[in-house]
Amino acid sequence: MPVYAALLYTRDVDWTEPGYDKEMAEYQAFGEAAAAIIRGGNALYPTPTATTVRVEGKGGKVITTDGPYAETKEALTGIYLLECADLDEAVAVAATIPAAWDGAVELRPVITFPTPPSA
């Protein structure tokens, strides 16, 4: 079955801070309800903790910038990996993720590359 990355875009907050108990309970409930198809995922720290990396051509100078790749009102704040029968099922599941209620959930099919043999 295909795997979909569900990219969560929400308010840019630190979910480890106190005061988000209600929202965290909603994510916990989603996690329990969708446990059979969740293949991984985590929340991300706020965008000020991000570092963007660029390279001036292959093997060139490495340039780092503090902060996210793009500045937006809503930020990429988490990801789930969902194993679903098809996009229709992934959309139905994404609609139950709390981020969809006050932000957005972007779904992308995941390309699974073969595991290279051990050396």
Image (cartoon, helix red, strand yellow):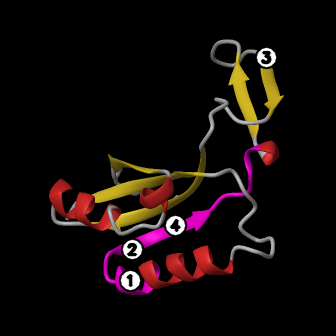
Dot 1: what SS? loop
Compute the Cα span from label 1 to label 2. 5 Å
Determine contact: label 2, label 4, CB under 8 Å. Answer: yes
Label located before the other in sequence (4 or 3): 4
Label located before the other in sequence (3 or 1): 1
Determine contact: label 3, label 2, CB under 8 Å. Answer: no
Label located before the other in sequence (1 or 4): 1
- Taking depth in this image into account, of 107 and 114 the one nearest to the observer is 107
Compute the Cα span from label 2 to label 4. 8 Å
Compute the Cα span from label 1 to label 4. 11 Å
* Front of the two marks 3 and 1: 1
Would you say residue 63 sits in the magenta stretch?
A: no
User: Which amino acid type is shown beneath numbered disc 2?
Assistant: Ile
Q: Estimate the x, y position of residue 39 in percent, counting from the top left.
A: 41, 72
Can residue 118 be seen in this snapshot? no
Numbered mark located on residue 38 in the image: 2
Dot 3: what SS? loop
Numbered mark located on residue 35 in the image: 1
